[in-house]
């Protein structure tokens, strides 16, 4: 039995549908993520799980127990669900230890203190229980907020954009730390974020949301390499769409040559494969485009972004189409220079070319 079950959840404000028929399960000890742009319904859905919002249709179960259906809600405080907020929501007049122990008032003092000390060690804040929140860094405050949520040993932890107030480097490091803490506690969790790096660092499974619906529920690897539709392909990762023509169900021809796929091309809704001669748009990620000085294929460097170990090059082909390529940073090429490239594509991800599309309409995410 799944630890958390959502079945056909619909949530509306008046006539406006915010969450539209969402279903998914989260297994015990797993970390799931709702990923999507602002306004897609992910935070509203999290609030429905927490019990802060009613639903119009469907049902939510935690450990098999019904906690929400249309016209019925178990109160948030009775759900044994821990919540970690974007702004930490720590009590400024309480010490770190008192914040962590806030939900443990029913325990004897010795047990309460033992749990506080255990969590201070778990979140890496040994010796700081007597400090106040304003004396801590943003990352430390977030750890306190997590420890407070974990303290009563809830059935489920919900995290609402927990790292959005932190700088990029700290955000990426802390997301890995939080994942390790949740795993060490054996906790089931649901994270909401618009940041794919956080989602990839933390989650076992990710649901990409748009317009109140789950567009795809999959592992981070499959979201990146096997997106279910154009929205997922465009939202997750960086990449471009290059026009191509289907040769057969395992081959497609693009400007840079013939691509062979280890999986059948699935570029039409409801069809196993495109027919011969079908015009499609092939998704190419930066790691699909390899810099190779020996290659006869040449591309012009339009732009470059230094990332320490790598450059992210924006390249222009003879047709005017643009590609992205990740290249080790010892290959330091100037804008306007032509470099050799080749494709290294394990399997082809492609979608039917919209009838209104032209070869110049290349979708690039930077």
Image: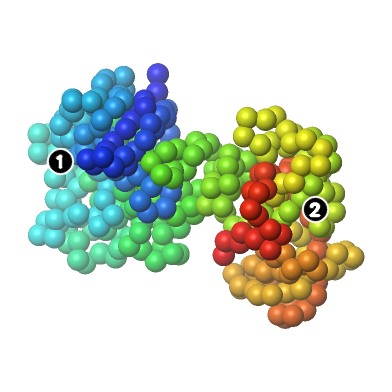
Nearest-to-viewer mark from 2 and 1: 2
Mark 2 lies on a secondary structure that is: strand
Q: Which sits earlier in the primary sequence, circle 2 or circle 1?
A: 1
Q: Quadrant of the C terminus?
A: bottom right
Identity of the residue drawn at 76% across and 42% down: 278
**x, y percent for residue 202:** 45, 46
- The circle drawn on residue 103 is 1
**x, y percent for residue 301:** 72, 74
Dividing the picture into quadrants, the one containing residue 323 is bottom right
Q: Is residue 360 left or right of residue 143?
A: right
Identity of the residue drawn at 67% across and 69% down: 314
Task: State whether residue 244 is above or below residue 364.
Answer: above
- The circle drawn on residue 254 is 2
Q: How many marks?
A: 2
**x, y percent for residue 249:** 79, 35
Q: Nearer the viewer, residue 65 or 17?
A: 17
Decide if residue 303 is in sight here: yes
- The circle drawn on residue 132 is none
Identity of the residue drawn at 65% across and 75% down: 303
Distance CA(mark 2)–CA(mark 1): 60 Å
Dividing the picture into quadrants, the one containing residue 105 is top left
Q: Residue furthest front?
A: 356
**x, y percent for residue 75:** 15, 31
Mark 1 lies on a secondary structure that is: helix
Identity of the residue drawn at 80% across and 68% down: 318
């Amino acid at each position: 039995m799944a630890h958390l079950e959502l079945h056909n959840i619909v949530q509306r404000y008046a006539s406006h549908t915010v969450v539209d028929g969402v279903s998914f399960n989260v297994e015990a000890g797993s970390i799931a993520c709702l990923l999507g742009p602002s306004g897609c319904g992910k935070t509203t859905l999290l609030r429905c799980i927490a019990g802060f919002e009613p639903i119009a249709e469907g049902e939510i179960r935690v450990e098999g127990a019904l906690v929400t259906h249309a016209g019925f809600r178990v109160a948030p405080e009775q759900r044994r669900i821990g919540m970690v907020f974007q702004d930490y929501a720590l009590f400024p007049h309480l010490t770190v230890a008192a914040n962590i122990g806030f939900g443990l008032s029913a325990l004897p003092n010795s047990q309460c203190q033992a749990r506080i000390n255990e969590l201070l060690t778990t979140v890496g804040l040994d010796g700081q229980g007597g400090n106040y929140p304003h004396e801590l860094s943003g990352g430390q405050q977030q750890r306190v907020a997590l420890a407070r949520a974990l303290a009563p040993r809830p059935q489920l932890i919900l995290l609402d954009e927990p790292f959005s107030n932190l700088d990029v480097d700290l955000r990426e490091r802390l997301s890995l730390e939080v994942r390790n803490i949740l795993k060490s506690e054996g906790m089931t969790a649901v994270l909401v974020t618009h940041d794919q790096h956080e989602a990839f660092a933390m989650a076992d499974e990710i649901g990409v949301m748009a317009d109140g619906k789950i567009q795809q529920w999959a592992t981070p690897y499959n979201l990146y390499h096997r997106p279910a539709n154009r929205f997922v392909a465009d939202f997750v990762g960086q990449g471009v769409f290059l026009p191509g023509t289907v040769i057969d169900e395992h081959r497609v021809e693009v400007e840079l040559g013939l691509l062979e796929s280890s999986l059948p091309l699935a570029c039409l809704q409801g069809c196993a494969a495109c027919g011969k001669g079908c015009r499609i748009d092939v998704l190419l990620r930066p790691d699909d485009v390899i810099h190779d000085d020996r290659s006869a294929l040449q591309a012009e460097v339009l732009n470059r972004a230094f990332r320490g170990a790598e450059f992210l090059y924006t390249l222009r082909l003879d047709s005017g189409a643009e590609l992205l390529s990740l290249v080790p940073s010892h290959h330091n090429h100037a804008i306007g220079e032509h470099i050799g490239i080749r494709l290294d594509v394990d399997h082809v991800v492609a979608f039917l070319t919209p009838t209104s599309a032209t070869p110049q309409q290349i979708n690039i995410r930077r």
